[in-house]
Image (spheres, rainbow, N blue to C red):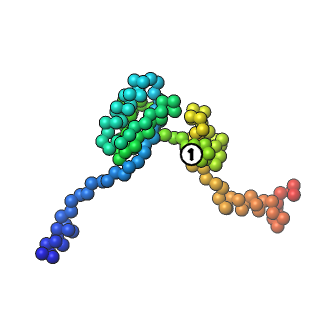
Amino acid sequence: MGALNYIISNFCTVPSKKIKTMQTVEIKVKMDCDGCERKVRNAVATIKGVKSVEINRKQSRVTVNGCVDPNKVLNRVKRTGKKKAEFWPYVPQHVVAYPHASGVYDKRAPGGYVRNVQTFAASADTEEKFMSLFSEDNVNACPIM
């Protein structure tokens, strides 16, 4: 029996199902009327694994909670006729270090939100180069000092 169990466990594997985790998907989609909102809500609510759908028409935001694939939700929203639907590109303004930097501030963003852009701090090498420009040890330093 030991050899048979070894063969079965190593050579006769059943492909396991992918287990989807509970997640929140946020989508930006323009909705003008109750009909648009109802159409999007019904389309998303029929996806297998969706637990709840919240729609905020003022912010043009659809929030879906459940065990779903984000791309599947986005494609389902686009199939309702909302071709400009995209994943929610905004984060709260207090989270970003420089909310008014170029590429971050967006006039179309809802109040208190800015575009989610990765901003990287200056590296130590760059800072060291600038500090050496104003160093007293550097012969070619800035003559203003």
Looking at the image, residue 108 sits to the left or right of residue 124; the answer is left
In-front residue for pair 46/133: 46
93 relative to 3, above or below: above
Determine which quarter of the picture holds residue 4. bottom left
Circle 1: element type: loop
Q: Is residue 65 above or below residue 5?
A: above
Classify 60 as above or below 144: above
Please give left or right for residue 40 compared with residue 28 in the image: left
Q: Is residue 90 left or right of residue 48?
A: right
Q: Position of residue 144 (x, y in %)?
A: 87, 55
Residue visible at 34% across and 33% down? 43
**Residue receiving disc 1:** 117
Q: Residue 104 at what x, y percent from top left?
A: 60, 42
Tell me the quadrant of the picture where the C terminus can be found: bottom right
Q: Residue furthest bottom?
A: 2
Rendered location of residue 74, percent (x, y): 39, 38
Q: Tag 1: residue type?
A: Val
Q: Is residue 81 visible?
A: no
Q: Dot 1, how many residues are within 10 Å of its Cα: few (below 14), some (14-19), or many (20+)?
A: some
* 110, 87: nearer the viewer: 110
Q: Residue at x 76, y 62 (%)?
A: 132
Quadrant housing the N terminus: bottom left
Q: Residue 99 placed where, x, y %?
A: 64, 43
Residue drawn at point x = 45 percent, y = 27 percent: 31
> Left or right: 49 with respect to 123?
left
